[in-house]
Image (cartoon, coloured by chain):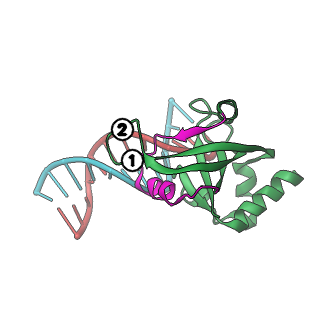
Chain colours: A green, B cyan, C red
DNA sequence: GCCAACGTTGGC
DNA sequence: GCCAACGTTGGC
């Protein structure tokens, strides 16, 4: 079981919209590193749902329900993954909070800020959940 | 709105 | 295969 972080600009696709939809296919990835990460996802993996640009915080948890398949919005070789919402974070965890935490300095979110689909280590995952529950 | 970071494209 | 130019992302 692996952990991930997926980014969305809330004005394009927000956590609220995601919860209303009940499931969605994650399209629009046009970056090779992000594509590689999408294709490495397995059913049951969980991902933090992060609002970029506006909010700049982790707002919820999503689960992989269908592994990577051809992006239906293009004939080129890109993939999408189906996600369903699991639950909102107890409290959102902001980018500023992550930046200020000595234990989270190696997160891809900080080091590879432009990567829209990125792996999260189990340690980072648990640490962020703890922050969410205690802040 | 600006700009740094960085991935991609294309000329050589 | 190198690297300059360019476009995009995303924080501030």
Residue A89 is situated, as x and y percent measured from the top left of the image, at: 78, 46
Residue A11 in the magenta stretch? The answer is no
Q: Quadrant of residue A102?
A: bottom right
> Left of A28 or right of it: where is A126?
right
Residue A38 in the magenta stretch? The answer is yes
Q: Say if A35 sits above or below A8 in the image.
A: below
> Left of A107 or right of it: where is A41?
left
Residue behind mark 1: A78
Q: Which mark is residue A74?
A: 2
Q: Say if A62 sits above or below A33 in the image.
A: above
Question: Which region of the structure is painted magenta?
Answer: A22-44
Chain of the residue under label 1: A
SS category of the residue bearing label 2: loop
Residue A125 is situated, as x and y percent measured from the top left of the image, at: 72, 61
Residue A4 is situated, as x and y percent measured from the top left of the image, at: 61, 56
Residue located farthest toward the right when viewing the structure as drawn: A134
Give the residue displayed 64% in from the left and 33% down from the top: A14
Residue A30 is situated, as x and y percent measured from the top left of the image, at: 41, 46
Could one spot residue A113 in this view of the protein?
no
Give the residue displayed 65% in from the left and 64% down from the top: A1
């Amino acid at each position: 079981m692996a952990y991930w972080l997926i980014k969305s600009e809330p004005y394009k696709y927000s956590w609220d919209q995601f919860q209303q939809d009940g499931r969605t296919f994650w399209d629009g990835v046009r970056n090779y590193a992000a594509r590689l990460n999408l294709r490495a996802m397995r059913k049951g993996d969980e991902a933090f749902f992060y609002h970029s640009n506006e909010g700049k915080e982790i707002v919820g948890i999503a689960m992989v329900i269908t592994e990577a398949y051809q992006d239906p919005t293009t004939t080129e070789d890109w993939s999408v993954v189906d996600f369903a919402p699991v639950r909102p974070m107890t409290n959102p965890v902001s980018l500023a909070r992550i930046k200020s935490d000595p234990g989270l300095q190696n997160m891809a979110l900080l080091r590879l800020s432009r990567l829209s689909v990125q792996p999260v280590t189990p340690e980072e995952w648990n640490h962020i959940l703890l922050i969410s529950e205690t802040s």
